[in-house]
Each structure stands twice: as structure tokens, then as C-alpha cells.
């Protein structure tokens, strides 16, 4: 499977605690630490958009079980990263450790020696807890972005439906929808049928059902997108009277006092 950037840049809980002095007690978006720490800045700038996730660089030869690569953080610090392709749909680049680098201590307590010791001790790689936090973080991101994604997708579809004889099939925040636009004199009715079939999240790979909460959020996003284009709606209501037969869908309609079709 091919993984295209941007990659999901993560820091293991052990590294986050040992190298940066923080405990992970909730899902973290580690990009929030950019600008506060040189190692985190370097990690994101060199790994997030690298198609190879760092695998084209300097391999840490003392680490044997997995292909781990050196992250150069200035002259006196080294990080160890691993390009993890086991959790699609997005690849993860893990920052496994950050340690001081000094050639005078090579073979004893230089960064590369510490990386090797961590591997032998079973402390270098991500734990099940790290992966659980990945899952939680991805689901939170998708939930947080659902409303804004739906509004932008709906706006683009509404512009197209006006140009396509009043009927269009598309997706809003990955959810299949059908739009039907009908004019009634001075009124415009926009009917929206929303598929109830589960969809797969782009980030998490999890299956999401159309819960009441997600349906209402999608309906609100579509309403706001329509009002951005056509002005304030007169009404919004659920409907079973979709212009074409409903097919495992929930529908609602919006009424506007003026028509953009005329």
C-alpha cells in the first residue's frame, strides 16, 4: 500500500516523558508543540512531508529489529524515527527517542548507544497504549472537522446543482447525499437526502454510522452553506417527500424566499 504525505507524526509516550518531560494523559496533536521545542520542529519539518518518512536517510545500524533512522537535531542531538505502515489509511512516523550526541562518548552513552539499549530493554517502540491514542486522536480529528468539511462540500455541490437542472448526487464530508432543487413561484425548495449507510473515515479507517448527532450536524452545515449562497432560509424541516424515492436515506428540506435559478 502506498502512503502519501502528510504523514501522521507521533511521539511515543515513553519518549514524550523521558525526552520532553511530559506525560500523555489524553490524545495529543503533537503539532501543537511546534514552536516550543527544536526537536519537535525538526521532527515535523523533516518527516511529515517526506514521501519516504525518513527512510532515505541515515539508518541507525545499532538498532536491529526495525528500520530506524537518525533525525539530526543540530550538532549535539539525535532522534530516532520509525516509518510505521501498519495502521492505514495514514502512515505514522514515530519519534522513538531523542538523546544527546557526542562522538567522545561513542560506544558508551552516545545517542546511538542509548537507542540500542532501549531496543534491547523493549522500550524503544510504540506500545499498545500509543496505538490506542492514535485511534482516539484520529477519531477526534474527524469529528472536529466534520462540520467544516460538510459546509465546504455542500457549498460546492449547491453551486453545481443550480447548474444541473436541479438534481445532483455527491458526497458531503464523505457521506453520500442527493440534492433536488425545485422552484415554487417566489420560493425555492432544496431537498437533501442523506445516506444512512456507514462511511469509512479517511484518517481513522473506522466505520461511522449516521447517528442523530451526525445527521443534525450535517443538516446544519448544509443549511449554513445554502445561506452563504442564497440568503437566510425561511424554514428547515425533516421530510419524507423527496422528489425522487428515498433509498435507505434520511431527508430534510430548506425553503428560501427567492430563487438563484431565475
Image (cartoon, rainbow, N blue to C red):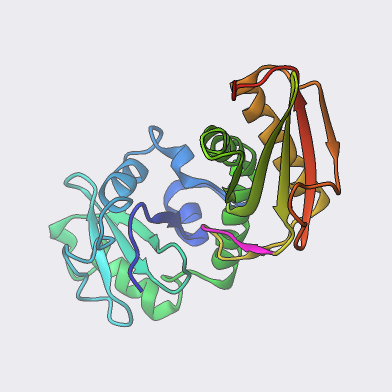
Report the residue that reaches farthest toward the left.
Answer: 103
Main SS category, magenta section: loop
Q: Residue at x 62, y 29 (%)?
A: 225
Identify which residue, 16 or 176, lies in the foreground: 176
- Is residue 26 among the parts visible in the rendering? no
Residue 124 spot, x, y in % from top left = 41, 70
* Residue 252: percent from left, percent from top: 79, 42
What residue range appears in magenta? 198-202
Name the foreground residue: 79 vs 131: 131
Residue 246 sits inside the magenta stretch: no
Q: Quadrant of the C terminus?
A: top right
When the figure is inspected, residue 196 is found, relative to residue 259, above or below; the finding is below
**Location of residue 85 in the rendering, given as x and y in whole percent from the top left corner:** 39, 71
As drawn, 184 above or below 11? above
Quadrant assignment, res 236: top right
Q: Residue at x 41, y 33 (%)?
A: 36
Count of marks overlaid on the render: 0
* Left or right side of 186 for 56: left
Question: Does the magenta-highlighted stretch encompass residue 201?
Answer: yes
Q: Is residue 226 visible?
A: yes
In the picture, measured across the screen, residue 187 lies left or right of residue 170, that is: right
Above or below for 213 versus 60: above
- Dividing the picture into quadrants, the one containing residue 130 is bottom right
Quadrant holding the N terminus: bottom left
The extreme front residue here reads 185
What residue lies at 37% left-to-right and 38% top-to-bottom? 37
Q: Does residue 58 appear to the left or right of 193 in the view shown? A: left
The percent coordinates of residue 157 (x first, y second) are: 55, 39
Amino acid at each position: 500500500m502506498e502512503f502519501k504525505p502528510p504523514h501522521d507524526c507521533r511521539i511515543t509516550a515513553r519518549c514524550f516523558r523521558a525526552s520532553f518531560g511530559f506525560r500523555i494523559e489524553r490524545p495529543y496533536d503533537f503539532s501543537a508543540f511546534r514552536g516550543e521545542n527544536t526537536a519537535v520542529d525538526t521532527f515535523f519539518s523533516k518527516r511529515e512531508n517526506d514521501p519516504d518518512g525518513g527512510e532515505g536517510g541515515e539508518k541507525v545500524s545499532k538498532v536491529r529489529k526495525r528500520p530506524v533512522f537518525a533525525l539530526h537535531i543540530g550538532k549535539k542531538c539525535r532522534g530516532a524515527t520509525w516509518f510505521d505502515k501498519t495502521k492505514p489509511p495514514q502512515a505514522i512516523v514515530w519519534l522513538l527517542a531523542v538523546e544527546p550526541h557526542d562522538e567522545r562518548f561513542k560506544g558508551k552513552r552516545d545517542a546511538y548507544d542509548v537507542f540500542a539499549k532501549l531496543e534491547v530493554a523493549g522500550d524503544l517502540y510504540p506500545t499498545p497504549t500509543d496505538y490506542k491514542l492514535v485511534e482516539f486522536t484520529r477519531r477526534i480529528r474527524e469529528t472536529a472537522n466534520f462540520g467544516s468539511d460538510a459546509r465546504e462540500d455542500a457549498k460546492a455541490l449547491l453551486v453545481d446543482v443550480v447548474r444541473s437542472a436541479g438534481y445532483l448526487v455527491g458526497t458531503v464530508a464523505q457521506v453520500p447525499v442527493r440534492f433536488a432543487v425545485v422552484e415554487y413561484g417566489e420560493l425555492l425548495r432544496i431537498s437533501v437526502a442523506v445516506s444512512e449507510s456507514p462511511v469509512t473515515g479517511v484518517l481513522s479507517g473506522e466505520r461511522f454510522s449516521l447517528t442523530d448527532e451526525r445527521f443534525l450536524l450535517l443538516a446544519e452545515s448544509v443549511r449554513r452553506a445554502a445561506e452563504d449562497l442564497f440568503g437566510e432560509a425561511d424554514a428547515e424541516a425533516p421530510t419524507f417527500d423527496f422528489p425522487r424515492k428515498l433509498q435507505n436515506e434520511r431527508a430534510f428540506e430548506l425553503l428560501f424566499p427567492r430563487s438563484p435559478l431565475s
